[in-house]
């Protein structure tokens, strides 16, 4: 009899554990939800940014090998986000205030919404080649991650404001205000060739790496009690 009761209690405990472990996560603490901490939100966007950079690095490398086996054909690139001030070394990044660094991250992510959409559309026009089909799917995946990540960073910034560690000056910036109108109109024309594709992938790989590193630094400066 004792063994039967032990088995019953074990099943009840397991069921309760699974319910708690699978409770949905929400931002405003509805019934049955787990309210994520600021550290949780940081971990999520950092993991997402690492995934974004990994996919973009692989896609750029594969695209370059497939389309430009002779790298001498690749000219000097100028990324459309060159107007966004982005420090390269860790010390200069750490000198930025939390508000300024958060805004830089949002600006970089916002600046890639339209170009990535155009990149996917342009790549998907030629479905006769297996690699173009593969690369267009990857471009769409990256585009989706960028939108999700920007929403995640915006929620994280809101949490920081509620906790008093971020001012109210950081807002949700429209992509049209981030880059010159000439650059946006160029991408909206849909006249992209293989060199344009390669340049966009190169620039996005560079910017996605900056976003990933900036988020890690922002976490360490905002939550210094954590082991960074």
Image (cartoon, rainbow, N blue to C red):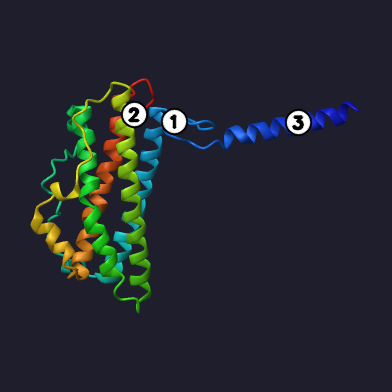
Instruction: Name the mark on residue 159.
Output: 2
Where does residue 114 sit, x and y in percent of width and height? Answer: 22, 56
Residue 48 shown left or right of residue 77 in the figure = right
Residue beneath disc 1: 36
Residue at the location (37% across, 64% down)?
A: 137
The disc placed on residue 120 is none
Among the 4 quarters of the image, the one containing residue 62: bottom left
Mark positioned earlier in the residue sequence (1 or 3): 3
Q: Note whether 18 is above or below 134 in the view shown.
A: above
The answer to whether residue 91 is visible is no
Mark 3 = which residue? 10
For the N terminus, give its image quadrant.
Answer: top right
* Direction bottom: furthest residue: 128
Front-most of residues 198 and 127: 127
Q: Relative to the observer, which residue lies in front, 34 or 58? A: 34
Distance from Cα at disc 2 to Cα at disc 3: 38 Å
Query: SS at mark 3?
Result: helix
Q: Residue furthest right?
A: 1
């Amino acid at each position: 009899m004792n063994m039967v009761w032990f088995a019953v209690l074990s099943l009840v405990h397991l069921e309760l554990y699974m319910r708690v472990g699978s409770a949905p996560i929400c931002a405003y603490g509805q019934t049955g939800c787990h309210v994520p901490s600021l550290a949780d939100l940081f971990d999520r966007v950092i993991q997402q940014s690492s995934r974004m950079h990994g996919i973009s690095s692989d896609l750029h490398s594969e695209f370059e090998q497939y389309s430009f086996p002779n790298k001498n054909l690749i000219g000097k690139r100028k990324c459309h986000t060159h107007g966004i001030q982005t420090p390269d070394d860790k010390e200069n990044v750490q000198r930025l205030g939390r508000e300024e660094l958060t805004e830089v991250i949002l600006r970089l992510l916002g600046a890639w919404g339209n170009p990535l959409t155009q990149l996917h559309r342009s790549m998907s026009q030629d479905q006769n080649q297996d690699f173009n089909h593969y690369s267009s799917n990857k471009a769409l995946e990256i585009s989706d991650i960028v939108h999700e990540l920007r929403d995640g960073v915006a929620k994280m910034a809101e949490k920081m404001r509620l906790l008093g560690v971020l001012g109210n000056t950081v807002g949700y910036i429209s992509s049209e205000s981030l880059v010159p109108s000439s650059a946006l109109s160029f991408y909206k024309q849909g006249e992209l060739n293989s060199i344009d594709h390669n340049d966009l992938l190169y620039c996005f790989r560079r910017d996605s790496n900056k976003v990933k590193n900036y988020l890690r630094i922002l976490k360490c400066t905002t939550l210094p009690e954590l082991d960074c």
